[in-house]
Each structure stands twice: as structure tokens, then as C-alpha cells.
Image (cartoon, rainbow, N blue to C red):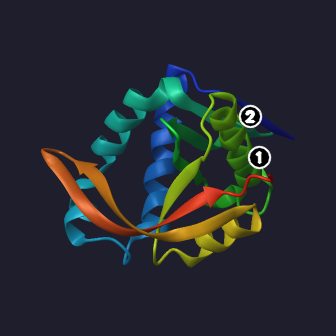
Amino acid sequence: MITIRAAVPADAPRIAEIWESAWRDGHLGHVPDELVAHRRADSFRSRTEAMIDRTHVGELNGQVVGFVTLRGDELDQLFVDASARGTGVARELLADGARRLLAQGHAQPWLAVVTGNARARHFYEREGWRDAGHLDYEAPIEGGTVTVSCRRYELIIPR
């Protein structure tokens, strides 16, 4: 059974674990080496703690297996543990994030996906998001940002 709920501070270690593993799976080979060098276990832990209040988790049979985080009108992070792929958790988290963004009054929810991450791009398109074009995304690192080649995906909103 899939459950989506607001994250609590006690979820942070599991979220950071999922984030680091899934991020590496989807990003290595598709992002600048400088960004990879900054994406260490401690950076995932500290960034998780800073975003816990805007994060929802997905549980499968009572175990946290994924999360979604919002920032402004952006669906900022969506990651699911490899063991939960194909279970529907990612779809439920994506739908939850989109609903929350719309409920907050954002007219055009969007997300960034690394250009080379074909699996994620296919997933978003299948779930009702459209590729709105190239985006130079400024990924935060200690002391600045790194520019990452991404695609901007926007939620298709029936008119």
C-alpha cells in the first residue's frame, strides 16, 4: 500500500540516503564533474534537513521509499529508491507535488530534469508534463552554483 505524507525530521536520514543513491543513478555522466565532486553524503544530509518542511514522503508498506520537495512554483526534487521503481510511488509523489503547487496558486508548475536522464524525461512526459525547452539550471554547491544542462518540464493544465 502506498501512503503519501508530510515529512518529519526523523525521516531526514532515510530521505538523504534515497536522494544520494537515486541522484547518482540518474545524474552521473550527465552533469559536470564539479557538481559530482560536491554531491557527497554530507551535502545530501544537510540539504535534506534544510528542506524537510517542504517535503512529502512516499511510503510503501510503511517504509519510506521516495520523496518530493517543492520550492516556489518548482517541483524541486523527486526521487524514489531503486527498489520501489515500477510500484507507482513515483507517480503518486509527482501527482502530490503537482496538486500542492496548484493549491498554492502557482499557475504553471514546472521542474528541471537533466538533459541526459532519458528515463526521467520519459516518465514525466507519460505523467502529463511537457518538455518546454532547454534550461541552464544553476545547481547550488558550497560557495556558489554549477550550471547544469537541463530540460524544463511544465505540467500540462487542461484549459
Q: In the image, is 150 to the left or to the right of 79?
A: left
In the rendered structure, which amino acid carries the disc numbered 1?
A: Glu
Residue 29 sits above or below residue 86 on the image: below
The number of numbered badges drawn on the structure is 2
The residue lying furthest to the front in this view is: 159
Q: Earlier in the sequence, mark 1 or mark 2?
A: 2
The residue that disc 1 covers is 92
Tag 2's secondary structure? strand
For the point 47% across and 46% down, the residue is: 17
For the point 43% across and 53% down, the residue is: 20
The percent coordinates of residue 21 (x first, y second) are 47, 57
The residue lying furthest to the left in this view is: 143
| Residue nearer the viewer, 68 or 75 | 75
In the rendered structure, which amino acid carries the disc numbered 2?
A: Ile
Residue 10 sits above or below residue 105 on the image: above
The percent coordinates of residue 129 (x first, y second) are 68, 61
The residue that disc 2 covers is 4
Tag 1's secondary structure? helix
Label 1 – label 2 distance at C-alpha: 7 Å
| Residue nearer the viewer, 156 or 115 | 156
Residue 135 sits above or below residue 119 on the image: above
For the point 70% across and 45% down, the residue is: 93
The percent coordinates of residue 111 (x first, y second) are 53, 54
Q: Residues within 10 Å of mark 2 (few under 14, many from 20)?
A: some
Q: Residues within 10 Å of mark 1 (few under 14, many from 20)?
A: some
For the point 75% across and 68% down, the residue is: 126
